[in-house]
Image: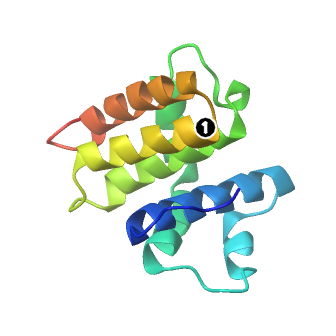
Amino acid sequence: MVIHAGDDPRSAAREQAISILYEAETRDVPASDVLSGLVVRPDALTERLVLGWEQDRSEIDSLLARLSDNWPLDRMPAIDRAILRLGVEELRSCPATPTAVILDEAVELAKRFSTEQSGRFVNGVLAAAARETRPDGP
């Protein structure tokens, strides 16, 4: 995955975090191992999202499994799982970031790295997650 987030450091951080989770899953290693093995240390948001998800993995994955109506996590494309996981982690751990921004970024990442259908799917699941994790909802 090549990161091309332009001038927005938060977008770049999200892309790098997704890349780290994707690599960890495909290599079957902890995400923190991928993070610590990087030649250039990532920014604070990337670390926060990756380590936050790793710490709360079972809770986040359980929420995603419940909200992704009849679509088990293990049947989703790995990149979609990474985007959803980090979207939920950001919803939970970054209250200052508007819900709409988190959802829009996740949808754009899904369209860019997966499929157009993935964008709609990611939007629906994260909107449902936002209703449960944030008082302002989607």
Image point 43% across, 72% down: which residue?
45
Task: Characterize the local packing of mark 1: few (<14), some (14-19) or many (20 or more) Cα atoms within 10 angstroms.
Answer: many
Secondary structure category for the residue under label 1: helix
**Residue drawn 49% across and 60% down?**
14
The residue identified by callout 1 is: 80
With 13 as the anchor, is 32 left or right in this view?
Answer: right
Report the residue at 50% width, 33% height from top. 64
Q: Quadrant of the N terminus?
A: bottom right
Quadrant of the rendered image containing residue 133: top left
Closest to the observer: 46 or 32?
Answer: 46
From the top left corner, tell me how far across and down residue 30 is, in percent.
73, 64
Q: Quadrant of the C terminus?
A: top left
Residue extending furthest toward the bottom = 40
Q: Is residue 109 left or right of residue 80?
A: left
Q: Residue furthest left?
A: 136
Give the residue drawn at x 43%, y 53%: 89
Which amino acid type is shown beneath numbered disc 1? Asp
Q: Residue furthest front?
A: 6
Q: Nearer the viewer, residue 62 or 18?
A: 18
Give coordinates of residue 97: x percent, y percent.
25, 58
Say if residue 52 shows up in the picture.
no
Q: Is residue 18 above or below residue 116?
A: below
Question: Which residue is more in the foreground, 13 or 36?
Answer: 13
Query: x%, y% of residue 118?
Result: 55, 27
Task: Please state which of residues 9 and 55 is positioned toward the viewer in this rendering.
Answer: 9
Q: Position of residue 60 (x, y in %)?
A: 49, 45
Q: Is residue 48 left or right of residue 79?
A: left
- Number of marks in the rendered image: 1
In this picture, is 32 found above or below 95? below
> In the rendered image, is residue 114 in sight?
yes
